[in-house]
Image (spheres, rainbow, N blue to C red):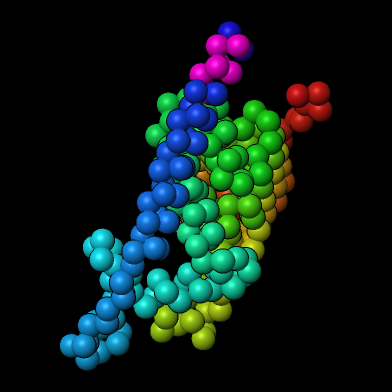
Amino acid sequence: MHIGFADELRKKRHLISAMEIMICGFIASMAKSRKWSINSDIKDEYNSPTFETYNIGMAYNQRDKISVSEVISDRKENKFIFLLKFARNWFLERMAAIAPVPTWRVALHRWRGIKIGKNVYIGYDVTFDRIYPELITIEDYAEIGDKCIISAHSRGSILFRDIYKRELKPVHIGRGSWIMPGVIITPGVQVGEMSVVATGSVVTKNVATKTMVAGVPAKLMKNLDIPVKENE
């Protein structure tokens, strides 16, 4: 049973490696052959942002340029290396969103850099921070339901960037916690051990150990009297 699973996971890993090579090749060819052009008929910078276009038909605007520059500055990385890593993580995330076996979903998210303990459940279409997955920690026996969003960074739009500064804040999901489907967890939140976050909640503050929270924003509903089995 275990040997069969290991063989299956190994095959999946080979497939992912092949896809990564294809993605890296695509980005390399894009970077090599790019041609820049600036639209001259743009009158309003914010209503009609200038686009940089590639000869292969791809484009990105001023907002994307600023975002990429910020991340590269944070990570002190070469732009090309960052794009390679981003493409790899994007592919792993898409695979994890639809993988039919929970163990596979956990493995794929680990490969993205998320710190995940043992016997963790992650549902379908869970979105972890795409730029800083390494800032998210999930302890043993935690469960995260479908379509949750967990972010470890934030900043305002171009027009609000002076008011809402860019922030990086780690997120920690405690041992045995149950995050129900559709929950949003904002940067910097610490979810205590053996706690429950009800469906559809938006968590903006820390959740105490052995409590249930719910709502938008999430508030304390009740304390939970749950015995902890130390040898699990």
The image position of residue 136, as x and y in percent, is 63, 51
The foreground one among 12 and 97 is 12
47 above or below 18?
below
Judge whether 51 appears above or below 169 on screen.
Answer: below
Residue in view at x 75 percent, y 30 percent: 227
Farthest front residue in view: 32
Instruction: For the C terminus, give its image quadrant.
Output: top right
The picture places residue 118, in percent across and down from the top left corner, at 68, 31
SS assignment for the magenta stretch, majority = helix
Which residue is the extreme one toward the bottom? 43
Which of these two is toward me, 202 or 79?
79
Say left or right for 62 vs 225.
left
**Looking at the figure, which quarter contains the N terminus?**
top right
Left or right: 141 in relation to 122: right
Identify which residue is drawn at 40% across, 34% down: 98
On the image, which quarter does residue 51 sit in? Answer: bottom left
